[in-house]
Image (cartoon, coloured by chain):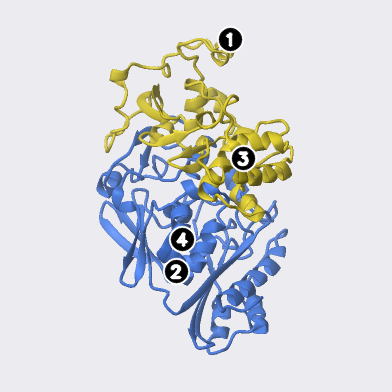
Amino acid sequence: MSNHHDELDEKTHPKGGFSRRGFFRGVGVTSGAIGSALITEDEAGAAQGAGAKAVGPGAVPVTLNINGREHKLNIEPRVTLLDACRNHLDITGAKRVCDRATCGACSMIINGKVVYSCTVLAVDAQGRQITTIEGFTSPSKPHPVSAAFVNNDAQQCGYCTPGFVTAAKAFLDRNPNPTEAQVMKGLGGNLCRCGTYMGVRKAVLEAAKAMKGGKNA
Amino acid sequence: MQAFEYASPTSVKEAVDMLSSNWGETDVLAGGTDLISLMKEYLHTPKRVVNIKGIRELGGIRKSGGGLRIGATVTIDELAESAPVRAEYPSLVHAALGITSPQIRNMGTVGGDLCQRPRCWYFRQGFGLLGIENGASLIPDGENKYHAIFPHPPAYYVNPSSLAPALIALGAKVKLTGPGGSRELPVEQLYTIPKDNNSRETVLAPNEILTEIIVPSAKGVRNATYEVRQKEALDWPLSAAAVALKMKGTTISSARIVLGHVGPTPVIAGEAERMLAGKSLNQNLAAEAGKAAVSGAKPLSENAYKLQLTRVAVKRALMEAAGLKA
């Protein structure tokens, strides 16, 4: 029984540039930062066409298309999409909460469908269109779902919120005119421990109205 | 999770060649919804992971001989949205939509649903597939409220597949491909009772891949699945029944009734099936069939409540299949 090895395994290396997260991590971790720094273009792309040739277990070049931008990384095949984004690319909107494909805080949209990014290998997400919450909403230009979450007090501590907003956007893209029952079912993959479900449901219904008759942001 | 080699072959042959003939050394990755958690818990520590999603022939749903051939990497969402599936197989659609959450349905695959490891918490906490410690299973005297009411010692876990009961009721087969070629077998024969903690619960060889599910035509076969669950989402059912009824007018000529989540393999309720033949279904008969379906059950210390859930699941699945109000 060895269920507590995550910290040992997922050595989180500071990335090349300075960032608040990189700084915090740098304080605690004094590793050589070999495996995971951003790499040059020439080295990237090999893992994608790995085909029948096995790569790894050490770091391999991985190219991810996130929010319309290509990111080239050098990471081990075991690194999840969530950890690649959070620990290597500073894309931290999606949260790591249960890390077991249950709570939904890590929700991202891949090729139009919402997934648990904690349970997708980054190496397996290559060649696909990955959208994180940063890709469709921002404080200066909030997506109708984000705005509706604010209007309906649909968050409390906020940990689940990015995942909920992402799952709600993906849900509304597929179901533009949902009933409340459909909203409940459609967001069944996300948990809120504060219990803000009432507000979330209202927010999603309001966002559906706001998005009607026009392209959403 | 332990570091591993990764490969993404584009043909079944390449994939099979990359798999070890010993369990534990390699794993097949499709949707990953089970495998990646198993690896995070160190329950699976493969040296190599072989991703089969890049193999084109394993995707897609094709009409074939009046029935369907469903590729192993078809996602649960694709299955539930498929027009030919919706047209003839409501039991499959219902079972697919019961699978936990939109995220899991978007990621998880049909082959993965059939091959996922049991949810038994002894297994998931590292006590082995059978929960055996010092030569005896911890489960009969342990925390067994979610375990089998049709145990098959030494196996007390329940088969976790949502689709298997419906597929068995419909007479579906699975195609398994290994180094020596392919074999087809009825879905019920995919599952077996492991003899020890290191055996597996399916007949798959370590270097075999479940490549396809072959579902016969369901023309004239009324079919339905009914699940009883504690929560609406994010969990496996407590009990489920899938039924397929061949009808002549309002008379049942033959019935298939398969129970899920109550035994280490899906349980075929033979006695209940036989009592329906030649009869016209009504609420009383459906309830009697529900009783017959659990007549051979041997519940454990904490799970006798599943008897009633299973009776109700059978009754409601029958009523739904026959188009009657429960």
Tell me the subunit letter for badge 2: B
Q: A162 or B26, which is in the foreground?
A: A162
Secondary structure at badge 4 equals loop
Same chain under badges 3 and 4? The reply is no
Tell me the subunit letter for badge 4: B
Q: Which residue corresponds to mark 3?
A: A103
Q: Which residue corresponds to mark 2?
A: B87
Of tags 3 and 4, which is closer to the observer?
3
Q: Is residue B308 left or right of residue B11?
A: right
Q: B227 or A57, which is in the foreground?
A: B227
Q: Is residue A186 left or right of residue A109?
A: right
Q: Residues within 10 Å of mark 2 (few under 14, many from 20)?
A: few
Q: Is residue A137 above or below residue B133?
A: above
Image quadrant assignment for residue B177: bottom left
Q: Name the residue: 72% across, 60% down.
A: B301
Of tags 1 and 3, which is closer to the observer?
3
The chain assigned the colour blue in the figure is B
